[in-house]
Image (cartoon, coloured by chain):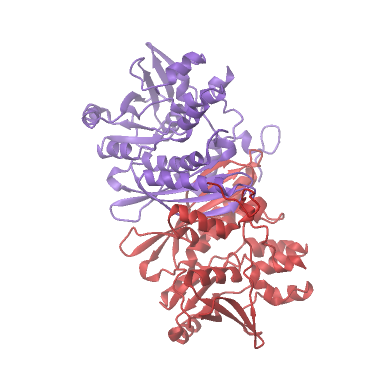
Chain colours: A red, B purple
Amino acid sequence: MCFYDADGETLQLRDVGERSIIKKLGEIIGTDAIADDCALLDIGKSYFVLLTTDTVSKRTHIPDGATPWQIGYYACAVNLSDIAAKGGFPVGLLFATSYPPDSELEVVLEITRGLADCANIYGTSVIGGDTKEGCDITITGIAVGKVKKTMLMRRKGAMPGDVLYTTGTVGRGGTAMVKLLNNTDTQIATRELLEIEPRITLARQIARTGCVTSAMDTSDGLASALYQLAEINDVGFQVEWEENNFPLYKDAVRVSRAFNIPLTDFIFYGGDYEVVFTVRGEVHQEFEKKCRRLHLPVTRIGTVTNKKGVVLLKDGRISSIPNSGYEHFSATHTLPVLKK
Amino acid sequence: MCFYDADGETLQLRDVGERSIIKKLGEIIGTDAIADDCALLDIGKSYFVLLTTDTVSKRTHIPDGATPWQIGYYACAVNLSDIAAKGGFPVGLLFATSYPPDSELEVVLEITRGLADCANIYGTSVIGGDTKEGCDITITGIAVGKVKKTMLMRRKGAMPGDVLYTTGTVGRGGTAMVKLLNNTDTQIATRELLEIEPRITLARQIARTGCVTSAMDTSDGLASALYQLAEINDVGFQVEWEENNFPLYKDAVRVSRAFNIPLTDFIFYGGDYEVVFTVRGEVHQEFEKKCRRLHLPVTRIGTVTNKKGVVLLKDGRISSIPNSGYEHFSATHTLPVLKK
């Protein structure tokens, strides 16, 4: 059997898009785990083992000015971010790397130092791996984590009436990408994009409150995360944009003015690596009190609704948020700002 | 700091070779786990969790005539082989795959069916993964296994006086490669190379005897495996080639005659995916009795010595076995047969 499009042409991946491919693959494999941040192994009595894998390739993900150390750091951090989104802590990392044979040895060693340093900063270590020839520098990380069964945060669980929160800020990734596209402050932008801080400790503090109903990381952007959570939970989201209260990344306003980009566009960009999560409506005030007491950088940004779709409430008006954000393979993943 | 060769040129990976690179990376990471088949996690009371990763890329590893299903099957099986070498059983697999955007969807689905079918045949399943764009079809498998702490087979442990064994046969991979190089029986050869049978059950039966002192799989060939075991254990190996007793792959003799290749060359080829292991000298007869009773396809092929190096004892004469076999990045990995 072959897949064809309407004109009888054989379908290629670029005709389909990443999330649709992943859905088809999940049907073959017989699991929906492939669509979650982590796979779960029920090995111990009180803990789940978390497993996640994420690949960084130089051509696709890395700005030209990045140092090899930054590439390694980033390839490690993106995997830790998936462990964080589950409320887990890392117990080890493996890296399967591919390098072209003409790669400089020192570059490979610096990338490896970046991997090891990032693991070390987050209290874990590299416990194995594999190095092969390839046509690009490609680093597939595998993070292994543990989470108390009672502390596990899943993607599924949000209900209408729940309150929507994010850790940290929205727009760090977008701000950096706009700078890079406009060839300004490229060193700072590269640092903002690659030297991310997986929310391991913060997410565990949030998970410990016992109030969270669903969570995922915003590696593909806030809009994309909300669309995915909406589909999994069969709910909708209303993002409530209060001008002085929305947790925009500190440099976003300046960049927005300098390059004439609507502030709200920053919710479409990936690269934030925050955790977006929902809290049961009845306990959200208690939850916020706990957060204030512990000085947790967590902000309410909306509510879960029973209407399909993701909308933005701003200045009293509701508008639809398009389901866009970075998607691999797709020819249509252009971000709003790139169309200008 | 930069690495330079004697002429002051910057060193590239192809100047160094895979095993030397892995050693340098291990120094940075601060572990020697990277050189073993699997990483171990001491999570439960009586079991270790085994983790291993192996990457298959179409350009480097796959013969032209291979079907997408075979590519998937192989990418899964090579990872299970590492779990087997430890005496473990698989509990789940993840796959991080990269595809060029112009890949046909049906090819991707068939590869995925191959992955899932192989996992299924060996009693496990795919529990997660990641799909990205890349310049080649690349499949990084991650196998998770479990092994009773008392049944773990390590690479380290061989002592002079131990007896050397292999499961199955030697030369399946080499026979297939010679056929492919000579463009004959290519379909059969492709099957021999890719539809390998990880020794999960057999290796566990061997591990259960409690007689094994060290083990590893022969994915890079018997000679390469013995050189690696020799270095780790600070011992030597004498391979004893008894004409009618050496467990050569069934088609090796015919291929050897047809293409005028010395039979002993087959120990240099990779792709056998058997388990080579050592047994304490004092218990080796008892071990062999157990194997006969259980009809295990296991053959004695030599002994562990206290002399450095790997030698071949054949027709009463001892000759040195060169440390050659497939090594990534290395410009000098030409196999003996290719030099003819």
**Considering the image in quadrants, where does the C terminus of chain A appear?**
bottom right
Q: In this picture, is A285 found above or below B87?
A: below
Which of the 4 image quarters holds residue A211?
bottom left
Q: Nearer the viewer, residue A237 or A306?
A: A306
Q: Is residue B154 left or right of residue A236?
A: left
Which of the 4 image quarters holds residue B329?
top right
Q: Is residue A308 left or right of residue B205?
A: right
Q: Residue furthest bottom?
A: A316
Residue B235 visible from this viewpoint: yes
Q: Position of residue A102 (x, y in %)?
A: 66, 39
Q: In this picture, is B68 found above or below B309?
A: below
Q: Position of residue B216 (x, y in %)?
A: 39, 36
Q: Residue at x 68, y 76 (%)?
A: A264
Q: Is residue B61 left or right of residue B127?
A: right
Q: In this picture, is B340 found above or below A49?
A: above
Q: Position of residue B82 (x, y in %)?
A: 41, 41
Q: Nearer the viewer, residue B161 or B78?
A: B78
Q: Position of residue B137 (x, y in %)?
A: 58, 44
Q: Residue at x 53, y 41 (%)?
A: B68
Q: In this picture, is B337 found above or below A126?
A: above
Residue B36 visible from this viewpoint: no
Q: Nearer the viewer, residue A190 or A138?
A: A138
Q: Is residue A181 left or right of residue B259?
A: right
Tally of marks? 0
Q: Nearer the viewer, residue A313 or A90?
A: A313
